[in-house]
Amino acid sequence: MTSTAALRQKYLDYFARQGHEVVASSPLVPGNDPTLLFTNAGMVQFKETFLGQETRSYVRATSSQRCVRAGGKHNDLENVGYTARHHTFFEMLGNFSFGDYFKHDAIRFAWEFLTQDLGLPKERLWVTVYDEDDEAAHIWLKEIGIAPEQLIRIGDKPGGKRYESDNFWSMGDTGPCGPCSEIFYDHGEDVAGGLPGSPDEDGDRYIEIWNLVFMQYNRSADGAMAKLPKPSVDTGMGLERLAAVMQGVHSNYEIDLFANLIKAIARVTNTDDLKNNSLRVIADHIRSCSFLITDGVMPSNEGRGYVLRRVIRRAIRHAYQLGVNEAFYFKLVVPLVSEMGEAYPELAKAQPQIEKVLKLEEERFAETLDQGMKILESAIADLKGKEIPGATVFKLYDTYGFPADLTADIARERGLVIDDVGFEREMEAQRERARSASQFGVDYSASVEVDVASEFTGYEHIDGEANVVALISGESQVDSLSANEEGVVILDKTPFYAESGGQAGDRGALSANGVEFSVSDTRKLSGVNGHIGKVNAGKIKVGMTLTVDVDQTRRQSIILNHSATHLLHAALRQVLGEHVTQKGSLVEADRLRFDFSHFEPVTKKQISEIERIVNAAVRANNAVQTRLMSYDDAVEAGAMALFGEKYTEEVRVLSIGEFSTELCGGIHAERAGDIGLFKIILETGTAAGVRRIEAVTGEHAVAWLEQLESNFASVSALVKGGREDTLDKVQQLVDKSRKLEKELEQLKGKLASSQGSELAEQAIEINGIKLLAAKLEGADAKTLRNTVDQLKNKLGSAVIVLGAVVGEKVSLTAGVTPDLIKQVKAGDLVKHVAQQVGGKGGGRPDMAQAGGTEPAGLDAALASVKEWVEERSA
């Protein structure tokens, strides 16, 4: 039997012999295509080569590309575990020609590899071509020599558009496109299913294993097809499908790679039935989750991170079905690395990181999984029809962290569906509430279209002269702005930096004879820099020449902080791992804020190490260099790009020695040493999988440390200590305070005991039940609870409610002995009293607590208890 790993290598070796460059798999997060959620085909990393936007050092390439289809348009998630061939993660073998060979060689290579290198029987291979592609049909029939009955022509779909066919491929509505030829393997007559193009084509007998795409046309917006001067080839073959054919099995989950994973999962989950669908789901999902984390995706509530979270939680839910009630998922990384670590060394390198992330995410979901399942089971039990209401699906999503597709998965297992429309209605209502809670000022960038040109000169200058080319007041362009009017001034050239990439916009002044305009912010408007502010004197008119001055002191503080964020980013990746990527930033004059992907709080030790590394880079005083180059050259040179950002053909690459290299359009210090000092002042979380660091630099860092020193001096004076012994003296005070608190608790306990003895004598009897409703002066909630326990012991059988006033708040505690809870429940009793003092509460039938905000009503509320108990004991 040929193993999956051996097949992968055999394919790459074959095409290497045919003059192809073996190219490593690109990450699952496309580097320069924000329109694509995940890499879902081998051609993704070559997209710009096919479009003619880049050239490479080779014209033939081959790869084994890791792919994910679990979100967006290409989404196989709901089918995973229910079919033989659907996966969230798969490997696509591909060979590519960039204007080199075309149909003859593409077809010859495919046939030769399948029939000679792999030895597949020719009579088992069937081929489809586009109905009008006579050239491909001729090659198959006359040059390759397949039997005419084994070639099928597939035309346009009935009722569809021209070229809308399973055998015609396009990159989009416009651009490169062309016919394709697919190769199918016949599993034999004993397997159900019909030929491609037949009504039974979805059966398992004829399985597509290889798709050869011939890019020979360029489609324009009007639908016209023009022949490409250099036709290209893009092919794709699923490794798992090929392995199933070579290993003689009908399901991808039966190939060696999956069989080994499933056995490992069965051991970890203590499952005997290796055919259980849940094992398949978990085996598939551990691959996609592990590789997504390897490629820098962290679980979160949006975008790629939310897809990862959905897949993780789907796997955990299937383990829950198998009876697993403890963290298990992270234990599967070891067997996965054993299967795939040799082919993908980056997976093995990231193993500790993957295990940490999966374990933490599993522990988070475990807190709500059981409770959420009970809510869902209850909803299903009460269901009248076959549809789970959207409100229930939303509650599970919003409160218990159940992604909607997870609920749909469970519903399908029960023969039910979910109300997608109702769920989306609830989601939109939530989004509307969020929008309503936000307050926005005038957003010039969203409301005004400006059709003028403006040159940015701020990389080299901070002052100069410029001409006014446009003025904006409110949402309209105007010819002039008068004294005391607020508006936007647009110049033909400006050194003012507009807010971008987290760096705050410049402030400063525009002036001329008798004219003064204070710039409070600078922002992008229709691609040009708009100076937002107020006319303090005179009148500004279109065409006027103004002197421009950027606030140099503020600008200098901002650029020091901006350069520091680059050093911080590099240090974070050194200390925490290469999974760290920027998720957002804010660079102001007084501080910097940096959001980044990480799965747990940064420890004090790690923060100290990060500070040490950054300050060492500052002291190294390397020059800050900026170079203009193509995006691909920049990435090849080691520049970090932000995933999801769309970059132009020419990008600015900022390097600080060899310590940091990133793509950045902002303004920076001349040397790292200009930063002076770097100090982290805050580390916190902003969302699941996202941490935030705030820091200060230069004079602001010195001022922060001076304030810290001043605070320390004040504490030293309070404890009458010096620099050497202040810590010891503070510790002595803390120890003394804890001792006094303990003694106070003991005294309160004794007080509760003595009060209990006195209060017990005040109990009255109603219908055979001892009742005590009383007020304790100055008692806190804990004292009330202890006193109720004392009274229950003393009275033996009783209903008790105690109240106390502390400041402007009311505390209540009710207790009922076990023999009486069928007649009177403590939760109901305390709720009755709390409602009369402006509060609410509840608890167990034998003990409950509540609070209130209306102390004046406490006496009357306690007096009402007698009648309330009488009604329930009559």
Image (tube, rainbow, N blue to C red):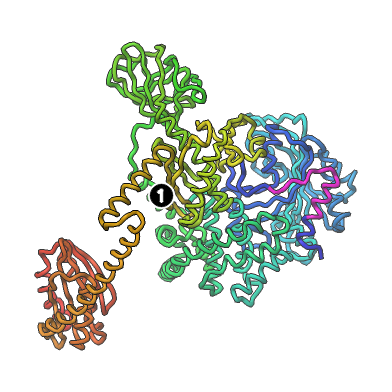
On the image, numbered disc 1 is attached to which residue?
682
Given residues 113 and 815, the one toward you in this image is 815
Residue 500 visible (yes or no): yes
Residue 383 visible (yes or no): no
Q: Position of residue 644 (x, y in %)?
A: 55, 42
Where on the picture, by quarter, is residue 467?
Answer: top left
Q: In the picture provided, is 230 more to the left or to the right than 26?
A: right
Residue 569 against residue 768 in the figure, above or below: above
Query: Dividing the image into 4 quarters, which one contains the C terminus?
Result: bottom left
The reply to whether the magenta stretch includes residue 602 is no
Residue 575 against residue 256 in the figure, above or below: above
Q: Position of residue 389 (x, y in %)?
A: 42, 60
Query: Dividing the image into 4 quarters, which one contains the N terminus?
Result: bottom right
Residue 82 against residue 557 in the figure, above or below: below
Q: Amino acid at mark 1?
A: Leu
Given residues 157 and 741, the one toward you in this image is 741
What range of the chain is rendered magenta?
9-25
Q: In the picture provided, is 774 more to the left or to the right than 416?
A: left
